[in-house]
Amino acid sequence: MFKLKKSENQSAQTESKTSLSTPSVATVMMIRHLSKLESVFLNLKQHPKFQAFFKKVSTFSSQHIAIGMGGVIVIAGFMALHKPINDQQYARILEVAQQTQYVSSQQLAQRVLQRPIEDVRLKHVLKINAAVQFEAKRIQHYAPIQTSPVKTEFEYPEYE
């Protein structure tokens, strides 16, 4: 399928002088490697031990493959959430715990800091960041109240 003979490779090099659409050296090398992989795969497919395996693999539908890939993604995400935190993330928790603008987030960060550092995971940092963003959206900032100058003397209206 991807096999190039020496004569084709030489003709491709001579055509490169006249044509702009000839493959580059990297492309030719990649095609050679793909053809080697293809021959290895075909040899494995003909081997009796692997014939049963390839029959099972060929019966999988695209739905099975998609479900399997989805499962791998979910497992990888679960594992990523349970990684220990680094110094920058710990500093972020300390920063949220010391601020006073977002009280609920501050309390959450203080509860997380009560745990041993080995037990604090990435999911806790993400939960704190989400709480800060949620609280920042909920807080309404009002303009300062403008006060009129206070009259110190009572003025009577003039009657005519």
Image (cartoon, helix red, strand yellow):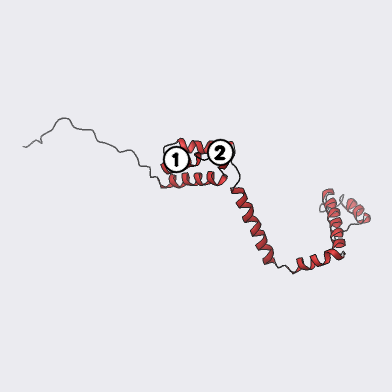
- Which quadrant does the N terminus fall into? bottom right
Q: Residue furthest right?
A: 7
What residue is disc 1 on? 106
Residue 117 shows which numbered tag? 2
Pick the residue in front: 156 or 68.
68
| Label placed on residue 156 | none
Quarter of the image holding residue 150? Answer: top left
Specify the farthest residue to the front: 116
**Disc 2 marks which amino acid?**
Ile
Q: Residue at x 59, y 38 (%)?
A: 86
Q: What element carries label 1?
A: helix
Q: Can residue 92 be seen in this view?
A: yes
Q: Which amino acid does label 1 sit on?
A: Gln
**Residue 109, horizontal then vertical, whole percent:** 48, 41
Q: Which of 21 and 18 is in front in this view?
A: 21
- Residue 141: quarter of image: top left
| Rendered residue at 92%/52% (across/down) | 10
